Amino acid sequence: MAIFTDEDRAFLGRPHIARAWFADLGLPSGIWRLHNGVGRQTVGGREWRGVSDPSGQQLVSISAVEDPRFGQAAKVDIVLSGVNSEFLRSVKDQARAIEGLTADLYWCAFDQETGEVWSGGMKKLFPGYLSSPKRQSQGIGLRTVSFAIETLWQSQNYVFGGAWTDADQQRRYPGDLGLQFVGVKVTETIKAS
């Protein structure tokens, strides 16, 4: 089975083909569909809002999407610069609610001269979840908000913080009897009445 058809290869071989990133974010205020360009675009039957501003007031930066090494989870960093103080405040107020929400990253090619979207459509390259947002301000002129879109496997690399013994469980949670019989051979005798 061919990954690209002859029609796809002809389109992608044009002289001015560009790529665009699309983020489908499930935020507490509702679903946000954003792209890294300017203005509103309808692609894949959905309307996507641009987050870059041609006057340089707001820009989005998306880190490279890389295959991770073995034993390491993949993630993509997104940075919004030039955000206003109201948006910065809303991110602070909703930070806990944002963490762990769905975030899918799509990729699509288009012809810059004609605005034609690739017939291959949008490709869902990175299904994931939002990390807790990070806010940064420098004076009154520079404000940034950054997120990481992490895969399902992001939280799987943490080492367990202890041993599965009663003594270690008592150290972590005094009075907890949940591991009282771990490692103890128990024989149950059932008496008929």
Image: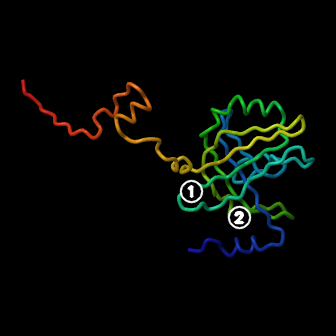
Structural distance between the alpha carbons of marks 1 and 2: 34 Å
Q: Is mark 2 on a helix, strand or loop?
A: loop
Q: Residue at x 83, y 72 (%)?
A: 15
Depth check, front residue: 74 or 30: 74
Q: Do the residues labelled 1 and 2 touch (CB within 8 Å)?
A: no
Percent of width and height locating residue 23? 70, 49
Q: In which quarter of the image is residue 174?
A: top left
Q: Which comes before the other along the chain, label 1 or label 2?
A: 1
Percent of width and height locating residue 122? 68, 58
Q: In which quarter of the image is residue 139?
A: top right
Q: In which quarter of the image is the C terminus?
A: top left
Percent of width and height locating residue 103? 64, 46
Please tell me how crowded label 1 is: few (under 14), some (14-19), or many (20+) other residues with Cα within 10 Å: few
Q: How many marks?
A: 2
Q: What element carries label 1?
A: loop
Q: In which quarter of the image is the N terminus?
A: bottom right
Q: Residue at x 84, y 50 (%)?
A: 38
Depth check, front residue: 98 or 174: 174
Q: Which residue is drawn at 61% across and 49% down?
A: 150
Report the residue marked by disc 2.
119
Give the numbered dot on residue 72: 1
Quick check: 140 left or right of 49? right
